[in-house]
Image (cartoon, grey):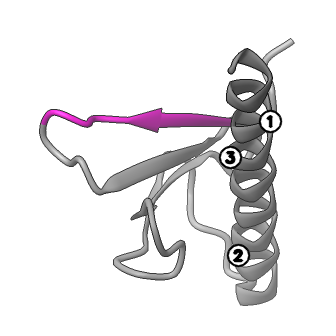
């Protein structure tokens, strides 16, 4: 089973950008600033963009929560290694 969200980056070309990939319909890639989720944010739709703006807002909010949790989890993992 593929996770609902995945993290991706391209640090060689866009070092300050992170991508959150939503793998369920409607599939999309959310591009945002690694330090500020809402800065330079752009949604790249893989499937058709939903007409419902509230649905889009909910998906972006879910992506933000996912990112925050992932970054916090990574910090915890690195803290344990030290």
Q: How far is the residue under mark 2 from the one under mark 1?
A: 30 Å
Q: Residues within 10 Å of mark 2 (few under 14, many from 20)?
A: some
Per the rendering, the mark at residue 76 is 1
Q: Which residue corresponds to the image point at 57% horizontal and 36% vertical from the top-left? A: 7
Per the rendering, the mark at residue 19 is none
State which tag comes first along the sequence, 3 or 2: 2
In the image shown, does 38 or 23 lie closer to the viewer? Answer: 38
Q: Quadrant of residue 33?
A: bottom left
Residue 39: x and y in percent read 41, 81
**Range drawn in magenta:** 6-12
Residue 78 highlighted magenta (yes or no): no
Per the rendering, the mark at residue 56 is 2
Q: Are marks 1 and 3 in contact (CB under 8 Å)?
A: no
Q: Is residue 12 left or right of residue 72?
A: left
Q: Which residue corresponds to the image point at 87% horizontal and 12% vertical from the top-left? A: 1
Q: The residue tagged with tag 3: helix, strand or loop? A: helix
Q: Residue furthest bottom?
A: 53
Residue 26: x and y in percent read 69, 51
State which tag comes first along the sequence, 1 or 3: 3
Q: Is residue 1 above or below residue 41?
A: above
Q: How far is the residue under mark 1 from the one under mark 3?
A: 9 Å
Q: Are marks 2 and 1 in contact (CB under 8 Å)?
A: no
Residue 18: x and y in percent read 43, 50
**Mark 3 or mark 2: which is in front?**
3
Q: How far is the residue under mark 3 from the one under mark 2?
A: 23 Å
Residue topped by disc 3:
71
**Mark 1 or mark 3: which is in front?**
1
Q: Quadrant of residue 74?
A: top right
Residue 69: x and y in percent read 81, 50
Q: Is residue 24 above or below residue 35?
A: above
Q: Quadrant of residue 59?
A: bottom right
């Amino acid at each position: 089973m593929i996770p609902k969200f995945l993290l991706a980056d391209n640090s060689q070309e866009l070092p300050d950008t992170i991508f959150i990939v939503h793998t369920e319909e409607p599939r999309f890639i959310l591009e945002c600033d690694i330090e500020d989720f809402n800065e330079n944010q752009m949604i790249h739709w893989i499937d058709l963009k939903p007409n419902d703006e509230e649905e889009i807002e909910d998906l972006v909010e879910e992506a933000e929560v996912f990112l925050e949790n992932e970054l916090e989890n990574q910090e915890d993992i690195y803290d344990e290694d030290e």
